[in-house]
Amino acid sequence: MIDVRNVTKRFGGFYAVDDCSLSVEKGSITGLIGPNGAGKTTLFNIVAGAFSPTSGQILLDGQDVTGLPAHALFGRGLLRTFQIAHEFSHMTVTENLMMVPEHQPGEHLASAWFRPGAVGQRESEVRQKAEEVLDFLKIGHVKNELAGNLSGGQKKLLELGRTMMVDAKVVLLDEIAAGVNRTLLNDLVDNIERLNREFGYTFFVIEHDMDMIARLCDPVIVMASGSVMTQGHIADIQRDEAVIEAYFGGSPTGNATTSADHAAGAAP
Ligand SMILES: Nc1ncnc2c1ncn2[C@@H]1O[C@H](COP(=O)(O)OP(=O)(O)OP(=O)(O)O)[C@@H](O)[C@H]1O
């Protein structure tokens, strides 16, 4: 579903992502882990269209999407959720979900004047869909609550719900467990598994919570110093001495590679 081919991202002389290649299989829940500064978020930003790579290519379902902006990727079914949930805090939970779908006739003045029936029908379809999403996620009881009043975990569930409003194909989850209590974390994990199983969503997950990675992700890809160190089943990854060294024994500043090292032909 996602192919990252020899992607490099340089900030000045610093290689945050360094000739990185990896694949996320269609229908998988693939984890991306690695020590602080390994380049995970930068790679996510590139895949999600927030940054263009310095070099390399991104394919989405076989099509070259390198450098396409986030809204163009959204139109192709790729969505990202954030470490910090981006809800509209002064709107209700249902209204937050209803904001997501594109091409709502009600947004166009001409439609509102000339085809008021179509606008009303579309709005009631979108509202119905929002209610189904809230039922699926088991948060129907907060549908009329202002989103700003939700707990951190409920906001993450709402973020997941937003992906369901447009029937996403691939969802990038960015540290979705951060700041979420264990009960809601279980709900999140259950819902991610159900979206994967019942709707065929592909997930690509950055996560520091190893418990969540172990429960959800197979395979797990380990990044260090801007590129892929290894990948496989979490049980094997956790026994891998090179991975343990990268987490606990490596340079705390992450990638020390500079353009001068590259010029000199040094290994990353
Ligand atoms: N805009 C930027 N300008 C300069 N350096 C940057 C920029 N963004 C990231 N970096 C550097 O690139 C390296 C990789 O950062 P990145 O945030 O991608 O790592 P990460 O693996 O996501 O780390 P963490 O797990 O701590 O979030 C870091 O050393 C970071 O300081």
Image (cartoon, helix red, strand yellow):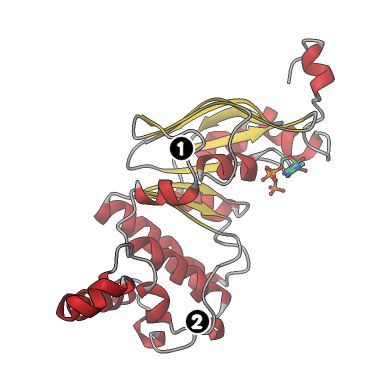
Q: Which mark is residue 20?
A: none
Q: Amino acid at mark 1?
A: Pro
| Residue 193 shown left or right of residue 219 in the figure | left
Quadrant where the C terminus is found in the figure: top right
Would you name the residue on which mark 1 appears? 219
Q: Please tell me which residue is depicted at 37% across the width and 87% down the height of the picture.
A: 141
Q: Please tell me which residue is depicted at 44% across the width and 41% down the height of the picture.
A: 218
| Residue 227 shown left or right of residue 76 in the figure | right
45, above or below 145, in the image:
above
Q: Quadrant of residue 195?
A: bottom left
Q: Please tell me which residue is depicted at 55% across the width and 86% down the height of the picture.
A: 149
Would you name the residue on which mark 2 appears? 147
Relative depth, front residue between 197 and 53: 53
Where is residue 13 shown, x and y percent of the image?
A: 80, 28
33, above or below 267, in the image:
below
Relative depth, front residue between 201 and 208: 201
